[in-house]
Amino acid sequence: MSAPEKVRPATFVSKVKAADAKRAAAVSGFRDRWSDLPKIWRILAAVAGIALLFGLPNIAIPGIPFRTDEIPNGTSFSFVLSSIAIYVLVAIGLNVVVGMAGLLDLGYIGFYAVGAYTVAIFGSPNSIVATEYPWLVCVPIAIALTMVSGVILGMPTLRLRGDYLAIVTLGFGEIIRLIAVNSAVTNGQRGIPVIPAPDKGLVEETFFPVGDFRSHYWLALVLIIIVVFAVRRLEHSRVGRSWLAIREDEDAASLMGVEAFKFKLWAFAIGAAIGGLSGALFASRTGFINSDGFNLLLSVMFVAAIVLGGQGNILGVTLGTVLVFYLPERFRFLEDKRELVFGVALIVIMVLRPQGLWPSRRRARELKDRKLEAKEAIVSG
C-alpha cells in the first residue's frame, strides 16, 4: 500500500486568489440580487445611498483624521472628499474614451487643464483678460473650448490606433502643460489667483467660504449624478452600442455599417467636455492654479483608476478612483514609503485581477473568452 500523498500547504498567492474569487462571487451575487429587487426598492436604496454620500463630510470616519486643534496637521476630510469627487468626474469622462470606445488616451490631463484655465482666465481679475465673468458663465465656455480641443485633437489623430494613438495623446497633454508654463496668458509658473467661487456675484454671502470644502464636494456630487445619468443614457443608445462595437473590433464594426471615425470623434468630444467641467470645479475649489497641478503623473493616475476599477463600468471606475486617490492619504503616516506601498498594491491587484475590481459583465465575459482562447492556442500549439 503506497504512502498517502503529502498535501502541500496553500501558498500566499493561492490564498489571495481564493479570497479574490470569493470577492468576485460576492459582487456577482450582489448584482443578481439587486436586479431581482422590485424597481421601487432599487429607487429607495439609490436615494438612501445618495443621502449617505451627501452626509459624508459631517460623519467622522476613521482613517483620515479631521483637522482640529488637537490634530493641527491632520488632513481635512472635506478636502479629501472634494478632491475625490472631482477626480471621479474626471474618471467618468475618461471612461467614455477608454472604457466605452476603447481609445487609449494618456493625455486626458490636457482637457482637464483647458477647463481649469478657462475659468481662471475669464473669471479672475488678475488674468490678462480680466473679464471677471461669473463662474456659471465661465463653465459653459470651458466645456465648449474643451469640446473644440477634443475635436481638433481627434480630427487628425483618430485614424491611428493602439500605442500610436496613446503616444499622440500623451504629446497633447505635454503641449498643454508647456503652454501653461510658458504662455503669458496663463501667467506661467506664477499662476492665476482669485478664481471666482461658483456663487460669486449671485448672493451677498457666499456658500463657498475659504477653507470649507463641503460645498465644493456637494456641488461636485450633484454634477456627478447628472453626468452619470447622461452617460448611462448614451451607453444604452445607438451611440453607446457603436462605441462598444468599435472597442471590440473596429474593422468588423465598419463592415457592419458603423461610422467608426465619427463615433470615435464623438467619444473624444464628450470625454473632453466632462474633463473640462471637472477642471472648472478644480479651479474654483483651489482658487489658484498654475502648471504644477497638471503634470503627466496625474494623467497616468487617471488611466490607472479606470483600469483598476474596471473599464466600461461606471461603478467600477468610481471604486478605482476612490482607491487610487484615497490610499495615498490613508497611508500618509508612512511618509516617503507610501508611494512604494501604493505601487506594490497596484501591481498585486493588476496581476491577480486584470479585468479590474468591478468590471462590467460584458468586459468580464470578453476577458474570460480571451483567456480560454489563449489556453486552447497553447494546447494546440
Image (cartoon, grey):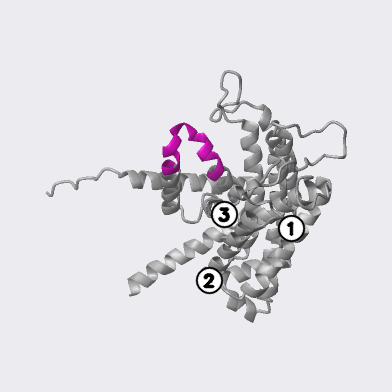
Q: Badge 3 is on which residue? A: 299
Q: Amino acid under label 1? A: Arg
Residue under the point 65% across and 79% down: 256
Q: Residues within 10 Å of mark 1 (few under 14, many from 20)?
A: few
Q: Which residue is at the front of the view, 57 or 211?
A: 211
The residue mark sitting in front, 1 or 3, is 3
Height in image: 2 above or below 67? below
Height in image: 140 above or below 60? below
Q: Amino acid under label 3? A: Ser
- Dot 1 or dot 2, earlier in sequence: 2
- Dot 3 or dot 2, earlier in sequence: 2
Q: Secondary structure at mark 1?
A: helix
Q: Which residues are magenta?
A: 324-341
Disc 3 from disc 2: Cα separation: 17 Å
- Please identify the dominant SS of the magenta region: helix
Q: Residues within 10 Å of mark 3 (few under 14, many from 20)?
A: some
